[in-house]
Every structure is written in structure tokens, then in C-alpha cells.
Image: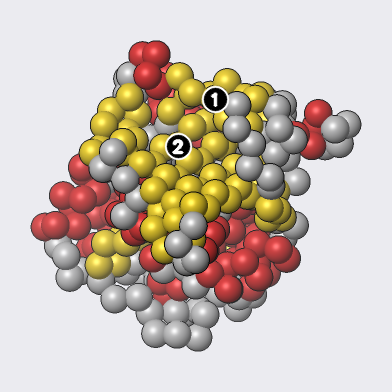
């Protein structure tokens, strides 16, 4: 296991702070580099963490402006149009994860991996909240002998605080991307216009107007389970907890349909909720992926390859950490309109 620091590019942002917090709590001995375009802000975050150093990042430089400084892994936590972070990681032969590119933007990272497939493990991390959707869904899917449909609805509360980079990513993927990918009757299709307008029931049963959304969960879950129908919707509004007079939360509704192991039709519905919103779960997923890549979990470091987060995170370990930071998973009654 390397003793070099883990580099968080965008580490002074909201996701970066949560990622650093969870890495520090689980692995206090691991040094961190908090990378940002604003050196003063990065240094401030590093000082608050302890055992960390703030560094200025230059995405136009081949070495990100870090010279020959060694690192053990690289996480890019905002949109890197130049794919500079990945090129840097490959040049050092160290693991890499990013969490911003949408499905329609995956080409540059895939191409970079194809041209250097043995240089480093590359994690395409733009799953919804980096494992908080895929890992529970794959666990719930074990109740089925045949899975026919996966329907995911993600609800972001209007009061959910996120940094400017996260808002820019959401704006880009929901407003400027004209279509969203889904799987329908075994075929991958792009939903546009009225076809992309959807709705789902929140945890409290309220119907939330939503829009189809392209995250890697769609292609990952479709491929992992073989389900011929997979769709993902995103709603922005009031969360179920806030409607009940409590503080806001983030929630993910996961509905599955198919045939159970008894040969009978089966439908299940679950809610994945965190009382502090989307950012803690995103930070937890990134932190746990980095730990797995480097071998901080006591297992050998991850070999070179192209991965989704759910392929690396061990479910029992993930659920343990998820619960420890306040996450809740509940079984809901299945409702039909």
C-alpha cells in the first residue's frame, strides 16, 4: 500500500470536504492533497482537516502543476473537460475516479483508458450518489429469479445545499443535454421531449413530477441484472421529511418488478434516505472507492481496468458505513396509480 497522499482535485468543494472527512475518519494516517484552483481556499480546508496540504491545480499543465510530486490516487470532483486528471493519473500509474461526466460525455475517459488499459484502474463514478443507488438495487434484486423492470426515482430537496460545481453539473445534465438514456423492452433508447417527462411517488406517497435523467446507473444496472426495462428519473422539490415538518433529506426510490424465487410475480419498493442530503452519500462513495483502489481496506490494491463504483464496493462494508453516517433504507408498500 502506497504512503503517498491521495489527491482530491476539487477537494475544497462540498463533495471534496465530505470525501476528505470520511477518508480521515476511516484512515486517519493517510495524507491528503486538497487540490483546487484557489490555493488559499484549498489551504484553508487542508488546515481544518489536519494531515493534509492544499495545492494549486493547473488543468492546462501535463503534471497539473504538481511537478514530480508523487500521489497514490486521483479523484476529480468537478467537470474536467480536458481529461487532465485522468492523463495525470495514467502517467503516474495510479488509480483514478471522476464523478461528473454524463453518459453522453463518457467518450474521452473511455478513449483514454482504451489507449492505456494497463496503466491504472479508472473508475467512471457518475452513478447517482456514487453507489447509493446501484448497491442497494443489486441487493434488492437478489430476491428475484428474473428481473423485468427497474425504476429509480431520485428526489433532491430544494434546500439541499451543494457547491457551485455540483450545481453546474446538474444544470448541464438536466438543461443542456437534450435526451436521457433508458432501456425499454431490451433496447436502449433516448428519451426526449414529452417522452422524458416522468413522475414517481416519494417515500410519503406524494407524486413528484420528474424528468428522465442520464446517469451510469441505467447502463450499469441493465447490464448487471439483464433487466429489459430500466429507467431513472430526477425530481427537484420538497422531500418527504420536510413535508412532515422535519428537516430536508435526499431520497432515492427503487422499484423492482419480476418473478420471485417461488415462481410468482414479485414487486418491491424501497427508499434510500439520508437526512443531510446528497453530498454526504456522494462523499462516502468516493472515499470508499479510493480506499478500495489503494488497498486501504486491507485487501490488495485494485488492478488496472475500467470500473463502475458498484463493481468495487463490497455491499456489507458499504451498508455498514452508510448506516454509521445516518443513512436509512426502508421497505415501502408498492402503490399503483
Q: Could you say where residue 308 lies in the image, as x and y percent from the top left?
A: 36, 58
Residue 249, quarter of picture: top right
On residue 199, the disc is 1
In what quadrant of the picture does the C terminus appear?
A: top right
Compared to residue 280, the image places residue 188 above or below, namely: above
Disc 2 packing (10 Å; few <14; some 14–19; many ≥20): many
Q: Residue furthest right?
A: 245
Residue 190, quarter of picture: top left
Q: Could you say where residue 320 lies in the image, as x and y percent from the top left?
A: 66, 70
The residue closer to the viewer here, 93 or 37, is: 93
Instruction: Give the residue displayed 24% in from the left and 54% down from the top.
Output: 87
Q: CA distance from mark 2 to mark 1?
A: 10 Å
Q: Could you say where residue 304 lies in the image, as x and y percent from the top left?
A: 25, 71
Compared to residue 98, the image places residue 118 above or below, namely: below
Residue 160 horizontal side relative to residue 105, left or right: right
Residue 111 horizontal side relative to residue 330, left or right: left
Instruction: Give the residue displayed 45% in from the left and 19% down from the top.
Output: 197
The residue closer to the viewer here, 37 or 273, is: 273
Residue 74 appears in the figure: no
Give the secondary structure at mark 1: strand
Compared to residue 233, the image places residue 271 above or below, namely: below
Instruction: Give the residue displayed 39% in from the left and 58% down from the top.
Output: 146
Q: In the rendered image, which residue does mark 2 sit on?
A: 232
Q: Residue furthest top?
A: 194
In what quadrant of the picture does the N terminus appear?
A: bottom left
Residue 279 horizontal side relative to residue 196, left or right: right
Q: Earlier in the sequence, mark 2 or mark 1?
A: 1
Residue 265 appears in the figure: yes
Disc 1 packing (10 Å; few <14; some 14–19; many ≥20): some
Amino acid at each position: 500500500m502506497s504512503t503517498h497522499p491521495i489527491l482530491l482535485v476539487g477537494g475544497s468543494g462540498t463533495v471534496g470536504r465530505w470525501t476528505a472527512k470520511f477518508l480521515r475518519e476511516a484512515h486517519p494516517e493517510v495524507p491528503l492533497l486538497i487540490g483546487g484552483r484557489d490555493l488559499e481556499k484549498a489551504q484553508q480546508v487542508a488546515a481544518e482537516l489536519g494531515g493534509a496540504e492544499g495545492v494549486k491545480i493547473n488543468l492546462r499543465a501535463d503534471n497539473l502543476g504538481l511537478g514530480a510530486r508523487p500521489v497514490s490516487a486521483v479523484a476529480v470532483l468537478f467537470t474536467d473537460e480536458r481529461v487532465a486528471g485522468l492523463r495525470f493519473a495514467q502517467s503516474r500509474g495510479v488509480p483514478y475516479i471522476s464523478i461528473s461526466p454524463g453518459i453522453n460525455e463518457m467518450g474521452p475517459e473511455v478513449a483514454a483508458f482504451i489507449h492505456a488499459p494497463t496503466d491504472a484502474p479508472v473508475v467512471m463514478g457518475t452513478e447517482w450518489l456514487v453507489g447509493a443507488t446501484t448497491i442497494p438495487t443489486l441487493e434488492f434484486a437478489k430476491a428475484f429469479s428474473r428481473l423485468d423492470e427497474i425504476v429509480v426515482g431520485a428526489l433532491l430537496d430544494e434546500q439541499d445545499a451543494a457547491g457551485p460545481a455540483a450545481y453546474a453539473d446538474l444544470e448541464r445534465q438536466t438543461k443542456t443535454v437534450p435526451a436521457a438514456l433508458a432501456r425499454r423492452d431490451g433496447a436502449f433508447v433516448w428519451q426526449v421531449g414529452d417522452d422524458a417527462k416522468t413522475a414517481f411517488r416519494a417515500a410519503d406517497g406524494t407524486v413528484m413530477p420528474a424528468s428522465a435523467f442520464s446517469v451510469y446507473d441505467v447502463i450499469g444496472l441493465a447490464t448487471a441484472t439483464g433487466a429489459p426495462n430500466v429507467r431513472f428519473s430526477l425530481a427537484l422539490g420538497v422531500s418527504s421529511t420536510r413535508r412532515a415538518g422535519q428537516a430536508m433529506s435526499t431520497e432515492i426510490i427503487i422499484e423492482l418488478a419480476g418473478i420471485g424465487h417461488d415462481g410468482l410475480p414479485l414487486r418491491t419498493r424501497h427508499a434510500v434516505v439520508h437526512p443531510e442530503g446528497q453530498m454526504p452519500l456522494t462523499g462516502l462513495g468516493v472515499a470508499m472507492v479510493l480506499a478500495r483502489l489503494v488497498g486501504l481496506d486491507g485487501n490488495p490494491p485494485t488492478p488496472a481496468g475500467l470500473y463502475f463504483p458498484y463493481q468495487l464496493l463490497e455491499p456489507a462494508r458499504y451498508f455498514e458505513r452508510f448506516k454509521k453516517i445516518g443513512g436509512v433504507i426502508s421497505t415501502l408498500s408498492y402503490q399503483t396509480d
